[in-house]
Amino acid sequence: MKLKNIIITGSLAAFALVFNMFEGSLPMPLPGIKLGAANVFSLLALVLLGVKEAFAVTLIRVFLAWVMTGNWFALLCSLAGGLMSASVMSFIYLKFRDDFSLPWISVAGAWAFNVAQISVVALVVNDIRVLLYIVPLLAAGTAAGWAVGWLALLLCKRVGSLTDINS
Amino acid sequence: MGMKCGDRGMLKILMVILVASSIVWGIRFMTAAPDVMSAEIIQDGKLLQRVLLKKGDQAKDFIIEYKGGYNRLRTEDGRITVIEANCPDRDCVKRGWLKKPGDSAVCLPHRLVIRLTGESEVDGVTY
């Protein structure tokens, strides 16, 4: 990893953490539903730098958010969700980039996040019927995922040139 | 911004999800909550109690403990909520009142699930 990539990765992770923490203080209509604005920066890392960096931004953000809140259960959910979402988005971006636009790649990531998140909840409380909660999660996740992907696309166009400069 | 073929594929999946869920949601919204229901209190996958909920009931609190933690539940007028808890996230408290069959609240740290069912018979376990 080039020094410049490391620096950009670190900055993106820092941005992601700030948005993550800010979002945590916003009231939400139902538990487990959030905007996921931190994912903007994982997407940016994926597009501007690569898969490794996208995972780095996600993992650093999830870990630091846990250090700051100390909530084990939020860690479990966001770790499973973040890994699943980063994997799905990376896979689509690498293999089917021509068939999907960024907002929809982000929606796919949101769906993956929701599936992992509710699976962790079902495992922890040992109750399979909790999985039905996937329906409102997916509905909210789609809207939030699309908005986040659209934002990431906009940012990619604005800051994309930063990484093009050979140095 | 034109949609690509993968985007359209995902949109189709989304349509199916939305239609299915809005039908389910619509039915739930249209049907009034029955006068008598019961709430299942499930901890770590095991049914602890079944609490009868009746329209017009007085407020009544009870506590479910879990390894030094607790959730204080309140039943009132045919509905139930977690009124207070000492878990780190308080998601169960934020969930608010459960009013209709199928509604549920989860407290992850205390491995607690509260779920409303339409059943009006309480057998064996009461409080």
Image: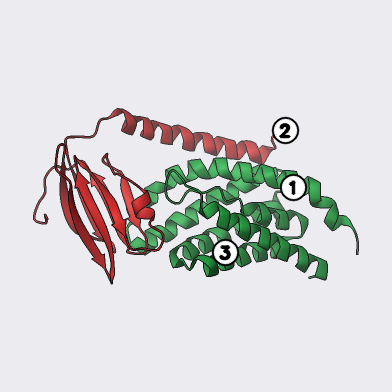
How packed is label 2: few (under 14 Cα within 10 Å), some, or many (20 or more)? few
The residue sitting at 70% across, 42% down in the picture is A101
The kind of secondary structure element at disc 1 is: helix
The label number, if any, that marks residue A82 in the structure image:
none
Q: Nearer the viewer, mark 2 or mark 1?
A: 1
Q: Amino acid at mark 2?
A: Gly
User: Do tags 3 and 2 sit on the same chain?
Assistant: no
State the image coordinates of residue A71 (x, y, percent, origin top left).
46, 66
Colour chain B appears in: red
Q: Position of residue A35 (x, y in %)?
A: 55, 47
Mark 3 vs mark 1: which is more N-terminal?
Answer: 3
Q: Which residue is mark 2?
A: B2
Q: Which residue is mark 3?
A: A62
| Chain under disc 3 | A
The amino acid at mark 3 is Val
Q: Amino acid at mark 1?
A: Leu
Give the residue drawn at x 32%, y 58%: A127
Task: State the separation of the CA atoms marked 3 and 2.
Answer: 34 Å
**Quadrant showing the N terminus of chain A:** bottom right
Residue at 51% x, 62% y is: A80
Residue at left 70%, top 47%? A152
* Residue B87 at x, y percent in the picture: 36, 63
Left or right: where B51 falls relative to A61:
left
Q: Say whether residue B33 is visible.
A: yes
Q: Is residue A100 something that shows in the picture?
A: no
Residue A154 falls in image quadrant: top right
- Residue marked by disc 1: A155
Marks 3/1 same chain? yes
The image position of residue B127, as x and y in percent, is 12, 55
Element on which disc 3 rests:
helix
Chain coloured green here: A
